[in-house]
Image (tube, rainbow, N blue to C red):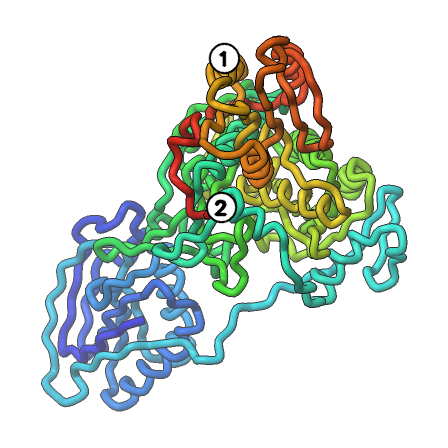
Amino acid sequence: MRVLLIHAKKFTYKTVKPAIQSPENPTGREKGDYVNVLVVFTTVESNDSEAVISNAIEEIAKVAEQINPSAILIYPYAHLSNDLAAPSRAIKILELLEKKLRSSLGNLKVGRAPFGWYKEFVLECYGHPLSELSRTIKAEAGTVRQVLEKKYYVLTPDGGIYVPKEFNYSRYPDLKILVDKEVFGKELPGGVNRVNEYCKKFGFEWEFMSDHGHMRYGPHAVAIMEAVMEYSWKIARELGIPIYRVMGTNMFNMAEKPVYEHAMLFGDRLYEVRVNGNRYILRYAACHQQFAMLRDWIISYKNLPFGVFEIADSYRLEQRGELSLCFRLRKFYMPDLHILTRDLSEAIEISMKVQRKILEEISKLGRRYVALYNITEDFFNEHRDELLGFIKNEGYPVLIAVIPPGTYYWVLNVEYHIIDNLSRPREIATFQIDVGNGARFNITYTDENGEKKHPVIIHTAIIGGIERYIYAVLDTAALMEKQGRTPYLPTWLTPIQVRVIPVSSVYLDYAEKVADEIARHGFRVDIDDRDESLGRKIRDAGREWVSYIVVVGEREVKSNTINVRVRRTNDQIVMNIEEFINMLEEEVKGYPKTPLPMPRYLSARPILSYQA
């Protein structure tokens, strides 16, 4: 906070016109006329909290005691700093400053001019040494964020509820790992994470010319990313409700009240940009953009429920020491789905569909989730039966963290964790039931009686962030390797699904014919036409985890067949091209097909940095 203190013989002001979109209501403060007044020109800055108020009062009181004014006027004045707080926050701090200053100074008159208005004023200043003073007010160095108190329980599908330290985890080792971390603060085990090596193998790398936590994606990584992005859109549409896909910006002005309030609930991981004195945040999910759109839509109860979907480039200022390839990033992609429902009852019903989809998708990887249910105390007490319904769907005990009501915008926030190859919980998917942002962003629908109501909103990333889902896939491969098996990716995700290798250049025409037919069916196929030995070509394909290596030579040309090596099983099969394509189609059924993001012929490719 910055203040300029002027001891004035006379000071008058009058509001002229609004200076911001939503100025403070000036009623009773439209004008002021003071004599012998200490005018406190005040700028509330972006990092100011209520903690600055006591220090501000101390400074003002110290000057007032020396000059003995008959009144003090708090006068909002944005020109003392370029680092301005959001208007809603500034108004709140100024209101509290006025209230507490009046209480502290007893009978001394304290006034405040309205915030957010252009005002004309006339000032006649005294000329003594204390008549003009400036101050920068800061909170005490020891001020820290309030720690949220949580009550933890373990809830079982049969309705049993236990204090975490008394629960028997012998049949639920995954849950114990999550409880040890979340409840007892047990440090995560260390070790070499094979996922990091897999990430680099496929071109998921840090970009060291950017800010920490930003990644670059080579052609192999792009193939995986595009496939997952398309899949995330596909499974959103499988929920059985209308879904609308949108796109938007990633930067939002903290001067907008709903943006500021929502951001403050997010906490200390805001990624900020300052432009022309304005403070912007980079979005940490698709919420701001979708909500800004939805408040402009004309929605009837007949339209509900429906969802809005975007693969949002998202930004979170994670601590540098916690950054992890494909898992904890400062910039990532979130397939964010928000579902509008009429009320809490319908939100619970639709959330169960979302939950079942989340559990179904992780099971396709051969994995299971262990869940942390963050719940407000009122929801926990009033919706115990519905909560138990969710737990029964899990088929596994869950950890519950109960928090005070009204702390956040949601009443239920479920985090789904895998236990990774280093026995650490890693959050992947999530859903929330949001009862606050409909009103905060003024999103409305018209009910059966013609009345405007705010929807209850479900937030979900069914498979988690794009990179986090890929982390789960690669972690599954790491577990295979740990078990002594050949690690592989699902065929729909493998960057090169099929590589055709002619035994020599004599058979290149046949290799091209085979590749053309495979590509015609939408599969990512390339040809190793390099002047290398067959053994070298097969080894290189193995290093890229190619799902199927197709070798063609004299025998294949004469019999019109192909020789197929299967990475997943290490089998070698001779078949015709139609049989092979039918096998591929069956294997990728239900998954998207995306194009090859590199030239077909290996001889045309440079040596990529992550393959060197």
Residue 332 position in % (x across, y down): 47, 45
Amino acid type at image mark 1? Lys
- 344 left or right of 13 in image: right
Q: Is residue 345 visible?
A: no
Q: Nearer the viewer, residue 134 or 310?
A: 310
- 349 left or right of 71 in image: right
Is residue 85 positioned above or below 388 on the image? Answer: below
The answer to the question of whether label 2 and label 1 lie on touching residues, with beta carbons closer than 8 A, is no
Q: Nearer the viewer, residue 233 or 58?
A: 233
- 531 left or right of 60 in image: right
Q: Nearer the viewer, residue 30 or 98?
A: 98
Residue drawn where x is 78% and y is 52% of the image: 174
Residue picked out by circle 1: 513
Q: Is residue 542 visible?
A: yes
Closer to the chain start, of discs 2 and 1, is 2
Disc tally is 2
Check disc 1 and report its element: helix, strand or loop: helix
Residue 176 position in % (x across, y down): 79, 57
Q: Image quadrant of residue 35?
A: bottom left
Which labelled disc corresponds to residue 324? none
Residue drawn where x is 44% and y is 53% of the image: 206
Is residue 244 positioned above or below 482 on the image? Answer: above
Q: Image quadrant of residue 11?
A: bottom left
Residue 210 position in % (x across, y down): 36, 55
Q: Residues within 10 Å of mark 1 (few under 14, many from 20)?
A: few
Q: Nearer the viewer, residue 337 or 334?
A: 334
Disc number lying in front (2 or 1): 1
Cα–Cα gap, marks 2 and 1: 32 Å
Check disc 2 and report its element: helix, strand or loop: strand
Which labelled disc corresponds to residue 204? 2
Residue drawn where x is 22% and y is 51% of the image: 19
The quadrant in which the N terminus is found is bottom left
